[in-house]
């Protein structure tokens, strides 16, 4: 799942710590569900592929 996180829209990089993290805002129940799915090796239901800087422009054309 870590390689999926690297390609996800919600993946953010923190320059100070040098680590990536998920910037998705979840409530407590959603977060617990996400961690339990992760422990069962299920894919992330919130995964959204990062289309890059020009992804929005492609949709407009």
Image (cartoon, helix red, strand yellow):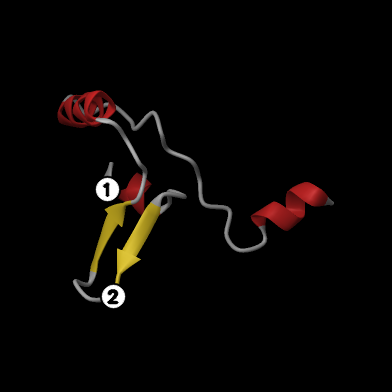
- Callout 2 environment at 10 Å: few (<14), some (14 to 19), or many (20+)? few
Where residue 21 sits, quadrant-wise, is bottom left
Of 3 and 56, nearer the camera is 56
Question: At 48% across and 41% down in the image, what residue appears?
Answer: 48
- Callout 1 environment at 10 Å: few (<14), some (14 to 19), or many (20+)? few
Q: CA distance from mark 1 to mark 2?
A: 19 Å
Secondary structure beneath dot 2 equals loop
Identify the disc placed on residue 2.
1
Where residue 39 sits, quadrant-wise, is top left
Identify the disc placed on residue 59.
none
Dot 1 or dot 2, earlier in sequence: 1
Of 61 and 26, nearer the camera is 26
Q: Are marks 1 and 2 in contact (CB under 8 Å)?
A: no
Image location of residue 17, percent across then percent down = 19, 71
Tell me the quarter of the image containing the N terminus.
Answer: top left
Q: Residue furthest front?
A: 27
Question: At 25% across and 29% down in the image, what residue appears?
Answer: 34
In this rendering, position of residue 25 left or right of residue 40: right
Q: Residue furthest bottom?
A: 16
Image location of residue 47, percent across then percent down = 42, 38
Secondary structure beneath dot 1 equals helix
Q: What residue does disc 2 label? A: 15
Question: At 35% across and 50% down in the image, what residue appears?
Answer: 23
Q: Report the number of numbered marks.
A: 2
Q: Nearer the viewer, mark 1 or mark 2?
A: 2
Question: At 17% across and 25% down in the image, what residue appears?
Answer: 36
Q: Residue furthest right?
A: 61
Image location of residue 29, percent across then percent down = 23, 23
């Amino acid at each position: 799942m870590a390689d999926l996180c690297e390609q996800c829209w919600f993946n953010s990089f923190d320059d100070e710590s040098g680590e990536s993290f998920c910037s998705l805002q979840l409530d407590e129940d959603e977060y617990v569900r996400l961690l339990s799915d992760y422990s069962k090796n299920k894919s992330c239901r919130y995964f959204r592929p990062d289309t890059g800087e020009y992804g929005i422009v492609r949709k407009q054309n």
